[in-house]
Image (tube, grey):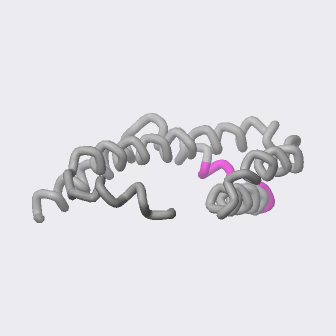
């Protein structure tokens, strides 16, 4: 298990050294200097997260459209858009890593996992 811990730390370091994460950090620092902009960004991210984590996927598209209409002008801010793009890029990288690990580790759950209502 020590090897897993070691390589996990190496993976974290590699992610933090990536261009996407470096850009994210730069943009995050600039936004942090403007508390009102950060507050608005956090509110947008919170609402977006709650929509994504909702229980009714049929409403997902409509809710996202509504949120984007409400925040249209806000999202036209180049700094905000850059932040959100960097954040999304990092999240997708982490998702790909997790997916690769899950697919590579055989835990004999294929027979019943499809039956579980997530």
Q: Where residue 109 appears, x then y in whole percent?
A: 27, 58
Q: Nearer the viewer, residue 79 or 90?
A: 90
User: Which range of residues does the magenta coloring cover?
Assistant: 28-37
Prevalent SS, magenta region: helix
Residue drawn at x 30%, y 50% is: 102
Q: Is residue 51 visible?
A: yes
Q: Nearer the viewer, residue 55 or 77?
A: 55
33 is within the stretch colored magenta: yes
Q: Is residue 33 visible?
A: no
Q: Quadrant of residue 32?
A: bottom right
Q: Where residue 77 appears, x then y in whole percent?
A: 79, 39
Count of number-bearing discs: 0
Is 2 left or right of 19, judged from the image as shown? left
Residue drawn at x 67%, y 53% is: 57
Q: Nearer the viewer, residue 18 or 55?
A: 55
Residue drawn at x 79%, y 42% is: 75
Is 77 left or right of 101, judged from the image as shown? right
Q: Where residue 47 appears, x then y in whole percent?
A: 73, 60
Quarter placement of the N terminus: bottom left
Q: Quadrant of residue 50?
A: bottom right
Q: Where residue 17 appears, x then y in whole percent?
A: 37, 42
């Amino acid at each position: 298990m020590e090897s897993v811990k070691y390589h996990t730390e190496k993976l974290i370091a590699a992610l933090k050294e990536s261009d996407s994460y470096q850009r994210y950090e730069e943009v995050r620092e600039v936004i942090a200097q403007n508390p009102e902009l950060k507050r608005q960004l956090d509110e947008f991210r919170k609402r977006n997260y709650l929509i994504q984590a909702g229980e009714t996927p049929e409403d997902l598209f409509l809710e996202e459209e509504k949120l984007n209409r409400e925040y249209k002008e806000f999202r036209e801010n180049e700094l905000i858009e850059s932040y959100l793009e960097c954040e999304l890029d990092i999240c997708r990288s982490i998702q790909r890593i997790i997916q690769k690990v899950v697919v590579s580790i055989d835990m004999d759950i294929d027979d019943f996992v499809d039956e579980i209502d997530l």
